[in-house]
Structures are given as C-alpha cells and as structure tokens.
Image (tube, grey):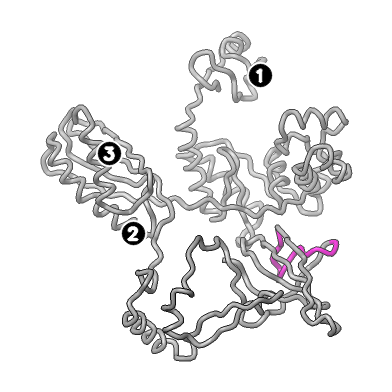
Amino acid sequence: MVDKPQRGRVIALSPAAYALGVRAGMSSVQAAAAAPEAEALVHDPAAALLRWEEALDRLDASSPAIESPRPGVAYLDLRGIPATLEEQRTKMARAISAPPCALPARVGIASTRIAAYAAARVDRIIEPRYEAAFLAAQPLRLLGLPAEDHERLALFGVRRLGELSALPAGALARRFGTQALRWHALARGEDRQPLRPRPRRIAIEASAQAEEATDRLEAILFACRGLIDRLAADLQRAGRRCARMELTLGHERGGEQRLRCEVASPTARAEVLFALLRARLEGMPGIGAAVNSVRAEAVRVEGGGTPLPLLAEPSPDPETLQTALARVAGAFGEQRLQRAELHEAFRPEARFAYVPFELSAALAPANRRDGARPTAHLRLLESPREVPVRLRRGVPCAVDGDDIVEVAGPWRTAECWWRQGSERDDYDVQTGGGAILRIARAGARWYVLGSYA
C-alpha cells in the first residue's frame, strides 16, 4: 500500500511482498521494480477512518468501554464480562474481520495497555503472572519514544523494556526529563492512566420521499424545513447538539447529491440549522436534476443540554423568590431550607456551616459575588465514611477496592495541637473509575471526606 497515487511511498505491505524484497519507505517505483507482479493499493485516509469507525462500532458489542488512541489500535475494558478470555478474544477478532469491516485483526489480552499491545503483536493472551517476563523481552519501540530519545537509549545499550526497567528511575529522569518516569513505569508494566472511553456515536437523521420529483429550490427548502424541525427535536430529546450536518438529495434518475454544512457553534436550534442549510443550497449553481427524496443527518453530534436554574434572572423579584422558596420548603421541609456560611479554618469540613436561609440576606448586594466560578469544587459528605485503603511504599494505591491513578498530598492538619491524636493527613486522589476524592488518614483509619465535581 502506498500513501498517494503518484510518487508515493510504501506504508504497508503483505508478507508475500516482503518476501519479494519490498520494504516500508520505498518509493512506488522501487517497489514496482522489486515486485513487478505485486498489486499496489493507494491509501484513502477518509475511507480508512470510516472503516475504522465501523470496526469500533462492532467492538462495542464486546465492551462499551473502548479507547482508540489512533486508527488501528483500540483498548477495551473486559472486567465484569461473563465470558472466558479466549471466548472474548475470538469474538473480537470475528467482529472486525467479518463484513462490512473485513479488517485483518490481531487481539491480545493482558492487564495493562502496554502488555495488551505487546500481546496483540503475537495474537495471544498473557496471564498476569507471566506479564513481567513477557514485557522484559519486548523491543523498546513499543513505547513510541521520540526518535532522538530512542537513539540515545540505544547508545547506552537499552533496546528492550527489561533493560529499561532495570535502570534507576531517578537517573533516567535527570538525563531524559520527567517523561522518562512514565517510560520506566510502562516498561515495568505499570500503567496508572485510566481508560478514556470514546463517546458512543448517535445517528440522528430525518428523511422524506416526494410524491412528484421537482427541481424547484422553494419546494426543496420547504421539505428541508420539516426535516430540520424533526432533526432538532430529536437532538433536544437526546440532549445533544449538531456540529456537522449533511443533506442528501436523491435524484429521480438515480444518483445522489450530498451537501455538508459545518456548524461553527454546535447547536440544536432548528432556525440556526435551517439558515445554514438554506445558505448552502442557495449558494449552489443549480440542483442539476429533479429531486424525489431528501435526507438530513447530524453526522457529528456533541454533548448538549442547558442547565435550567431555579431562578433565571440574576436579581430576582423578592415575591418571585419567596414563592420559589415556599415551594422548596413544602416539597422538602422547612428544616432543609438552609444556606452555607463560610468560616476560616484549616480543615475543609470546618470551613462552612449550614444556617437557616433568610430572604433578606439572599437579596443583599453584599452577598452577590461577581467573577468566574471555579471549574471544580469539593462536595463534602455529611459525615466522613470509613473506607479500606491499600498502600504502596506509604502512598495510597487503592481506595475501597478501586485503583488510584493519581495522588496529591498529604496535607497535615492539627487544629488541636495540644491534644494527642488530633493530627490528620488529607489526600486528593483520582480513581481508575474517574472519581476524584478527598480522603484522610487519622491514625490507622482512612475516611472519605467528599468528592470533587
């Protein structure tokens, strides 16, 4: 396979072509001279990406948690799936190799990304007890290091992951920078980065068939208006916004005409989408042939939805606010109508207290603050919850059975220094499931204080 029709270079080849002398990086002329009977295929990036998206959709039946860092590579979380590893490996291979994908597939299964990627190269399952020895024998290029760093490590005689993991991590960081610490951890089979699943593709479309074909722009726009209204309603129900829209005009004598509209600011408003589509149609030199079908599709959607505030106005009317508070008190009870009052304190749970809500205090200008809101804030539990925490070299590595991928801290507080046992160490941790927690150690016990949102 070459990257372009003329003066292209070989980017992939079959074992038969390799046996004839073809090598990656050769020009198309050199490859044709080495193997005159070989067939050269031209790489089509758009078609290849579409085929890969189809393969990911097929893999979704094996696990909904799929991460694809680049086309051709996918990582799946198989935990909790009721099937043997061999059954899952066979199912995934068949899903990709069967039509319409029809892609050659190699599937490897292991407990970490780096081990699974190495296992896929040999199409096998690696048990956890054999992973360390298996990774140690793998070539250094599996890490995808920059070319200059790869060459520098080769000068030191480091060509395999086992040789890299045997080096001191501190010396590597001093010579190659802090990114070498991640190389060192991956070479040992330690991957603390959580899986980042791809968003599931949602097909939102609307179509209409005309009783009589027409080439009049007004009639086509009239049909498009109804389709866009239906499309926008579906987007709003799904809580999505359209970032790219495609209109397909079916001609009476066969064939289709496709128009793609990029939405600069993704939206689910019908009037905006129709205005973009109308401008696109009016800018065409002509329809060309009679149209008997129209289909509108949101080919790229993004997360949407607008949070609805309790009170839409920044300075609500006192009577409107009092009515809303009365409804809240009637639904949840008068004792639940409270507000947080801030205090100066070392520990986060002592920095605020709940006091009865007063209407006059809520309407006072001094209590309204301008400026950007924080992107994340700590939501404390009403009372700390004791949890089991596993340590590795004195640092938390798992909380309540969930692996920890990032740790910040500790922060020691001792508000009552004269009282023995009042010291506490606080940590902020991110779990493999994506939760960010504030945990604390008091003596030999661990507690969850709250979570960030």
Which residue is labeled 2 in the image?
A: 236
Q: What residue type is labelled 3?
A: Thr
Q: In the image shown, does 341 or 55 lie closer to the viewer?
A: 341
Q: Which amino acid does label 2 sit on?
A: Gln
Is residue 119 toward the left or the right of residue 295 in the image? right
Magenta stretch mostly in which secondary structure? Answer: strand
Query: Amino acid type of disc 1?
Result: Arg
Q: According to the image, label 3 marks what residue?
A: 248
Residue 343 shown left or right of residue 248 in the figure:
right
Mark in the foreground, 3 or 2: 2
* Residue at image location 86% in from the left, 83% down from the top: 420
| Callout 2 secondary element | helix
Marks 3 and 2, how far apart at CA: 22 Å
Residue at the spot 51% in from the left edge and 21% down from the top edge = 41
Tell me how far mark 1 sits from mark 3, CA to CA. Answer: 42 Å
Quadrant including the C terminus: bottom right
Label 3 or label 2, whichever comes before in sequence order: 2
Q: Residue 312 carries which label?
A: none
- Of residues 230 and 10, which is closer to you in this image? 230
Vertical comparison of 295 with 340: above or below:
above
Magenta segment boundaries in residue numbering = 393-405
Labelled disc at residue 23: 1
Spatial CA distance of label 1 from label 2 is 52 Å
> Which part of the image, by quadrant, shows the N terminus?
top right
First-in-chain label (1 vs 3): 1
> Closer to the observer: label 1 or label 3?
3
